[in-house]
Amino acid sequence: MATNSIVDITKLSPKFQDLYAKAKDFVENDCIPAERIYALQMGKGEDRWKVIPPILEELKAKARSLGLWNLFLGLEYPEGPGLTNLEYSLIAELTGRAPRIAPEAMNCSAPDTGNMEVFAKYGTPAQKAKWLVPLMNGKIRSAFAMTEPAVASSDATNIETNIRREGNEYVINGRKWWISGAGDPRCAVYLVMGKSDPDNKNRHRQQSLVIVPADTPGVTVVRPMQVFGYDDAPEGHCEMIFKDVRVPVENIVLGEGRGFEVIQGRLGPGRIHHCMRCIGMAERGLDLMIARVTDSSRRTFGKTLGEHGTVVADIATSRIEIDQARFLVLNAAKKIDEVKAKGAMKEISMAKIAAPNMLLRVLDRSMQAHGAAGISQDTPLAHFYASARTLRYADGPDEVHRNQLGKTELRRATEIANKLKAQKDKSDQLVTSKL
C-alpha cells in the first residue's frame, strides 16, 4: 500500500489515528484473506439470493468490537463516531481495497450509508426508531428506488412514479430499475422517489420521498440486472414494480414536494465515499500489477515483465493518476467539512468525474499486465472493473457533473474580462508614458 503524503495523518485527531490503524489492519489481514471463503460460502443457483456468507457476520462482529462501525456519519450527527469527512475519506480508501466485504463488514456500505444519512438528517423520531436504529445495528439492509427505465433518470425531475394521497395513505405506482440492494433477503425498507405534485410549476417541488417497507403488498422485484454479466448477488441491482402500493402518510420523508431537496442532501458526502473507495481499489490494482510484473517465473524475451519499458511507464502513469485523483477527493472532503456539501459542489464534481475514470485506466493496465488472467475470475480485477464502470453513472453521470463544473467556471467570465481589461489599460498607460 502506497504511503499517502497528501495529508499528514499524525496531525489529525487521535481518535481517527486509532481507527485508521485498526481499519488498515482489519482490511489487509481480515477482509482480503476472507474474499475466497466469502465466494465459496455463497449460495448456488437461486440460493445465491437467499444465503448470506456466514464469514460476513463474523467480520461484522469483529469490526464492531474494534469500533470500526458506522464511521461514515459526520460530525453533525449525534449517532456518528465524530469523524470529519476528510478523516472518514481516508478510512473509506482502505475499505476500497476489499470493496465486496470491508464496507459492509464495517456497516459503511452503499446504499445503506446514504439511506441512514437520510433517516438521521430528515427522519422523524418514529422513523428513526423503526428504521435508522436497526440499520445502524446492521440488522437490516435497505435500498433507494429512484432510477426508472422509461425516462432519462440522470435528470431526477423526469421521474414518473406516481405518489397519490388517498385519505391517510399514499398510493404508489411505478417501475424502477437498477435498485441496488433490492435482491438482498435482509432488505427491509425502500426509500422511493416519485411525483406527488406533477403539475407544480416548480419542477423541483414535484417530487416526494416515501418510506416503503419491503413486505408491503404490491411491491415486486422483477429481476436482477447484470453488469457485464455480474449480478452482484445477494444484494443485486434490481428491476422493481410498485403497483397500488399503500403506505401511511407518516411515511413521507421531510414533507410533500421535498424529495428533490432530500436527495440532494443525500448525495454530497456519499459521492466522496465512492471516490475514496475508488482510490483504494486502484491502489490494490496497482499492487497486483507490480507483484505480477516482478514475478521472476514470468519472463518474456529474456526479461521479467517489469523490465520492459512500456510496463515501467504504465506503472508510473498509474501512480501519477492515483495521487492526482486522491488530491481531488481529499480536497473535496475538506471543502465539505468547511462549507458543507452545497458549497463544495465544484470540488465534488471534479472528484466524481476523475476518480472512477482514473480507476478504470489503472485497472485496465493491471489487467493487461496479467494477460488473460486479468479478465478471469482468478483475480478481483475484472469485477473491480465492472463495478468501477457503473460509478460513471451512479450518483450522477459524468456528463451532468461536467456540465455543472463548466457552468461554474463560466461564471468567472465577467471577472476575467474585467481583469484582462485592467491589464490592457495599464499596459497602454505604460507604453504611452515610457515612449
Image: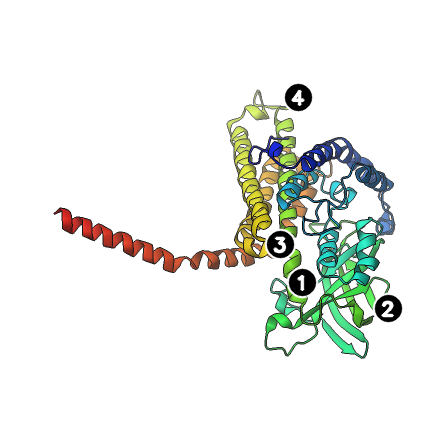
Report how far apart the C-alphas of labels 2 and 3 lie in the structure.
Answer: 33 Å
Residue at 52% in and 53% down: 346
- Depth check: 378 or 429 in front? 429
Label 2 crowd (10 A; few <14 / some 14-19 / many >=20): few
Report how far apart the C-alphas of labels 2 and 4 lie in the structure.
Answer: 60 Å
| Of callouts 3 and 1, the N-terminal one | 1
Q: Is residue 40 left or right of residue 275?
A: right
Q: Residue 49, image x and y in percent?
A: 84, 51
Between circles 2 and 3, the one closer to the viewer is 3
Where 249 falls versus 35 (above or below)?
Answer: below
Residue topped by disc 1: 262
Report how far apart the C-alphas of labels 4 and 1 lie in the structure.
Answer: 55 Å
Report how far apart the C-alphas of labels 3 and 1 lie in the structure.
Answer: 11 Å
Image-quadrant location for residue 194: bottom right
Q: Residue 98, image x and y in percent?
A: 72, 39
Residue 222 in view (yes/no): no
Q: Is residue 49 left or right of residue 12?
A: right
| Of callouts 1 and 2, the N-terminal one | 2
Residue topped by disc 4: 297
Residue topped by disc 2: 217
